[in-house]
Image (cartoon, helix red, strand yellow):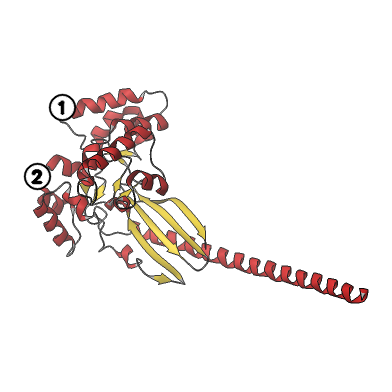
Amino acid sequence: MSAIILFLLIESVCVGIVASVLYANKSLAKSKLESEEKLKMEKMIYTISKELSLDGSPESQSPFDSIWNYHGKTSDGINISLEDLSGKLNINFVSDRMLQKVLSCMNGLSDGDISMIINSRKSQNRLVYSDEGLLELLGTNNVSYFTYFGTANLNTVEEEPFKLIVSSLCSGVTADSLWNKTLTLRKNDQQIMTETEFKLLLGVYYSDLKNILTINAPINVNFADEKILKSILTTGQTENLIRLRSQKEITAEDLTNICRGYNSDLSKSELGTRTWFWKINLCGIYVRCSAIVSQNKKSQTSIEEINWEYL
């Protein structure tokens, strides 16, 4: 009897060892496949990012550009999708005026809801830098119209985010002093329209602030949702723009002609034809990732961040 028990014990130990070895081998095999897939994705991100720099019309980006040939495609077992983040509103830097106008076009939001969102954004005294923060502030129905990637337009940014930017990036200056200079221009109905004026206003702090505080129109009309466009333009202008962009890439000249005569100051500061931030989404069998790519005024691209998720 004892011999049988001993045999069974030895057998169970052996089975356990074999199972452990098989599990370890399977884990190693999966880890290798994950690494190989991750390497493929890294190469794809750099290839797609490089495509942005080859755009033949760098002052306008639209679905007609060659980079969109990647969208919805599967390459080497990896599904690819692209997002133009400049077609959305940056929740950190959109002005209260613009935010109220856009939220008024959203479904299911009362005046009280809109006031609560605007006041909540102010009271946080910090910038939103996560999907969770965006969702918490805006709710599930309206979050798709917004992003937390982008730059702040010097002519429209509110006081709180302006001071947060200056305080975090510049040493030896009070945010109040730069804000007061900006505020003086606004009170006199002036806007900074050229890079030379921009440099003069920021002075020695230009190099510290130029990558996040800009005079670029943040919203690309070639991708912006109809509700965002209608918050700035008339219904007729919006319909004309949407009709035209379905046929061709909207250029800066096209946009000027469309916006002529109505809300011209707001449209100039908010609406443009450039994309400043892209999101590349890749999904394989073992790994999923998203990459944020930025593009500067000279159409040079840089990869801001890559987030990995193992499936």
Q: Residue at x 22, y 46 (%)?
A: 102
Distance from label 2 to label 1 (Cα)?
Answer: 20 Å
Query: Left or right: where does residue 274 sit relative to residue 42?
Result: left
Label whose residue precedes the other's in the sequence (2 or 1): 1
The x, y position of residue 66, in whole percent, is 30, 65
Helix or strand or loop: what does disc 2 sit on? Answer: loop
- What is the number of the mark on residue 273? none
Outermost front residue: 1
Q: What residue is disc 1 on?
A: 188
Q: What residue is disc 2 on?
A: 262
Q: Residue at x 48, y 63 (%)?
A: 41
From the viewer's perspective, is residue 70 above or below residue 238? Answer: below
Instruction: Please name which of the two marks, 2 or 1, marks the residue nearer to the observer.
Output: 2
Query: Left or right: where does residue 6 sit relative to residue 60?
Result: right
In the image, what residue type sits under mark 2?
Tyr
From the viewer's perspective, is residue 302 above or below residue 40? Answer: above
In the image, what residue type sits under mark 1?
Asn
Q: Residues within 10 Å of mark 2 (few under 14, many from 20)?
A: few
The x, y position of residue 272, in whole percent, is 21, 49
From the viewer's perspective, is residue 135 above or below residue 192? Answer: below
47 vs 24, nearest the viewer: 24
Could you say which quadrant of the image residue 245 lies in?
Answer: bottom left
Helix or strand or loop: what does disc 1 sit on? Answer: loop
